[in-house]
Structures are given as structure tokens and as C-alpha cells.
Amino acid sequence: MIDDHLPLLLLPGTLCDVRVFASIVPSNRPAIAADLTGANDIATLADAVLAKAPERFIAMGFSLGGIVALELAARAPDRVAAMVLIGTTARDVPAAGHAARRAQAESATDPVALIDEALWPGYVHPDRINDRALHEIVRAMARDCPPETFRRQTEIALSRIDSRSRLRGYTVPVLVLSGADDIIAPPETQAELAAGLPNAQIETIPGAGHFVPLEQPNVCALAITRWLAALSQDVPSHLSSANSGTLEVS
């Protein structure tokens, strides 16, 4: 059973901040945002986050933030009571791809231009490509990040290990949440992640890409609220990848 008052530790994705979670955090649950902008590798970042985090918490990570959540659970399993992993992966980045990722980070002097010119089409469902309000939220988060954030977060992503071999050791409840049309964290990686965790529930949201918390916030909020309510009542929430849930968009 998870205490209703246990705080959520919010772990944003690359070039994101707490705004990515703004509409999906239950109003009755305390939440604290972690800073993922000031380190150059995942070990240093995880230690810095843990130094400022509550003694015990539920980690909610989006994309890179989910990768950090897995690292926190590996380093401090007694402090991570549960996890919400949104559009994330347990895989590492193959060494063959490191040079290209670093070259992109070194050349990206303007993170907003990077989003506009390269990243945006892969961020959202095709139906939302021309959604100016959604686009502006993502641009605003990138604009407000400290200088060098994209380069540092690229190094954090590249420094992570392949966590698939240690998933079985994460026995806490986990909600794996993603967009059905996410091309950054596609459905097969979400199924793999959930299948590797002993106590995972997987929810796939149609009509959404990678930025599912902003594309379908109401559906995400419902999934998270239901999952947290089940935890507080000690209701088993395990779903294998074979019988994963799909929340309908209304």
C-alpha cells in the first residue's frame, strides 16, 4: 500500500521542465520538480537529485526523466516507492550512435531552432504537427532552459547503461505510460519495459506521440489517478505486455 501523501518527484525530459506534467499531476498529491539541467552524466545527476529529493517518493519521469527514474531506483531502492515511466526506455544508446548525437548537441546553439528545424515532427502525433499552442509550450520550455542544457542532457543520455538486465530487481509498482504513435519510444520498447518489470501496468494512449502528457493530458491524468488510487487501496495492478491496457480518448 502506498501512502496517499507520498510526494511525486517530477523528472522532466530533454529540454523540458515541470510544465510537461502540469495537467497530469493529481491535485491531491504533493509534487516536487527535480532539476535535470546541471550535470554531464547520469551518475552525477542521479546523486544530485537524490541529495535534494524527499526521503521516500514516487518517481514520475518523462522520456529522459524516466531513464533517470530507473537510475534512482537502482541507486536508492529503499527511497523509490513506485514509478510512473512516460515515453521512456530501459535501453542504452548504441556506441555507434554517440558521435552523431554529440555532433547534433554541439551544433545546436539555439534549442528552439533545433526543435523547429529537426525535432518537432518526431515529438507529436501527425495530427498535432500544426498545433501552434502545443508547439509553443514545447518551444517555451526549451527557451527557458539554462545554456548548455541540450549538450549536458545529451551526455546524460549517452552515459546511461542498458537497464534491461536490472529491471527484474525493480519490484515496486510501475506504471508504463506512452502514446500509441510515439516514434521515439515506440510501442515495442514500452512492451519490453513493462514485461521486464515484476509489478508493471502498461497503458497505451491512442492519438498521441512522444509528448503524450501534453497531447492527451486528460487521458494521462485519468490513467495516473486510477493507478495511484489502486496503490493506495493495495489493489494488485500488474498487467503483462500481453494484456496491456489502452485508454480511449474522448
Image: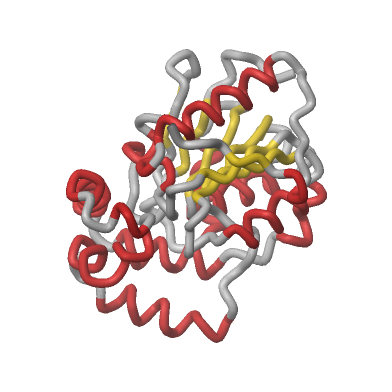
Q: Nearer the viewer, residue 131 or 94?
A: 131
Above or below: residue 160 compared with residue 128? below
How many numbered marks does the figure carry? Answer: 0
Q: Can residue 179 be seen?
A: yes
Position of residue 160 measured from the top left corner of the image (x, y, whole percent): 58, 64
Position of residue 20 measured from the top left corner of the image (x, y, whole percent): 36, 41
Q: Quadrant of residue 173?
A: top right
State which quarter of the image contains the N terminus: top right
Q: Please name the colour scheme applied to the rendered image.
A: secondary structure
State which quarter of the image contains the C terminus: top left
Q: Is residue 216 left or right of residue 161?
A: left
Q: Nearer the viewer, residue 92 or 239?
A: 239
Position of residue 114 measured from the top left corner of the image (x, y, whole percent): 24, 68
- Residue beneath the point at 19% across and 48% down: 136
Q: Is residue 179 left or right of residue 82?
A: left
Q: Nearer the viewer, residue 142 or 73?
A: 142
Position of residue 168 measured from the top left corner of the image (x, y, whole percent): 81, 50
- Residue beneath the point at 63% across and 18% down: 229
Q: Is residue 80 left or right of residue 38?
A: right
- Residue beneath the point at 71% across and 49% down: 194
- Residue beneath the point at 30% across and 52% down: 128
Above or below: residue 110 compared with residue 168? below
Q: Can residue 47 be seen?
A: no
Above or below: residue 205 compared with residue 26? below
